[in-house]
């Protein structure tokens, strides 16, 4: 048995639709849908979870063959947390990795997708710990060879 990845299905082109939504219904094979932006995929995931039967489960992700990770800005919806806690986290979406109903930001903050907001661009107060985690991830651990 293989683990499903966001490239299952292959019905839409990678270039035009790199983001995927997987819908799991009881007693049914998973269903995949593909989207051009993370915002489109997130909205579809929320719609499916809202409109589907109570046992419906879903996830979203970046297709496995996509060449690089994508940063997805997310924060908690107004009213679901104090304003101070509504900082913009940077969810790191790796190719082939599914994100279910609980999102875990690099800083460790957990967000339920039903009370989370996709930010089309980084806006609001950024999460310092997510920012530092991203900066650390992009900093080479060893100095590269210097060419004179
Ligand atoms: Zn954070």
Image (cartoon, grey):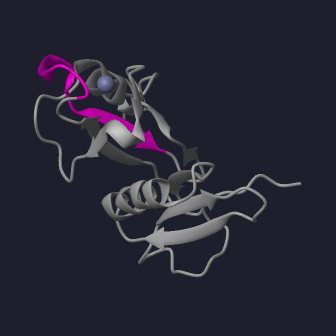
Who's the residue at 53% across and 80% down the image?
Answer: 12
Query: In which image quadrant can residue 79 be found?
Result: top left
12 is within the stretch colored magenta: no
* x and y percentages locating residue 91 in the rendered image: 38, 38
Quarter for ligand 1? top left
Q: From what the image shows, is residue 14 above or below residue 138?
A: below
Query: In which image quadrant can residue 47 be found?
Result: bottom left
Left or right: residue 84 compared with residue 1: left
Q: For this rendering, which residue is in front, 29 or 123?
A: 29
Who's the residue at 38% across and 42% down the image?
Answer: 114
Write down the region rendered in magenta. Answer: 80-93
Left or right: residue 39 compared with residue 82: right
Q: For this rendering, which residue is in front, 42 or 131?
A: 42
Q: For this rendering, which residue is in front, 40 or 146?
A: 40
Looking at the rendered structure, the number of numbered marks drawn on it comes to 0
Q: Residue furthest front?
A: 53
* x and y percentages locating residue 137 in the rendered image: 41, 29
Quadrant of the image containing the N terminus: bottom right
Q: For this rendering, which residue is in front, 87 or 82?
A: 82
Who's the residue at 52% across and 61% down the image?
Answer: 21
* x and y percentages locating residue 40 in the rendered image: 34, 64
Q: From what the image shows, is residue 72 above or below residue 46?
A: above
Left or right: residue 79 compared with residue 147: left
Q: Is residue 29 visible?
A: yes
Q: Is residue 63 visible?
A: no
Q: From what the image shows, is residue 129 above or below residue 61?
A: above
Quadrant of the image containing the C terminus: top left
């Amino acid at each position: 048995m293989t683990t499903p990845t966001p490239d299952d299905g292959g019905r839409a082109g990678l270039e035009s639709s790199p983001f995927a939504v997987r819908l799991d219904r009881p007693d049914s094979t998973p269903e995949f849908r593909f989207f051009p932006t993370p915002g489109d995929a997130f909205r579809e995931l929320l719609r499916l979870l809202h409109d589907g039967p109570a046992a419906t489960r879903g996830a979203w992700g970046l297709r496995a063959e996509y060449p690089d990770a994508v940063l997805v800005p997310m924060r908690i919806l107004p009213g679901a947390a104090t304003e101070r806690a509504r900082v913009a986290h940077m969810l790191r979406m790796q190719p082939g990795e599914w994100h279910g109903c609980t999102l875990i930001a690099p800083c460790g903050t957990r967000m339920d997708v039903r009370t989370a907001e996709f930010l089309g661009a980084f806006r609001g107060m950024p999460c310092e710990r997510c920012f530092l985690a991203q900066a650390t991830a992009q900093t080479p651990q060893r100095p590269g060879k210097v060419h004179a």
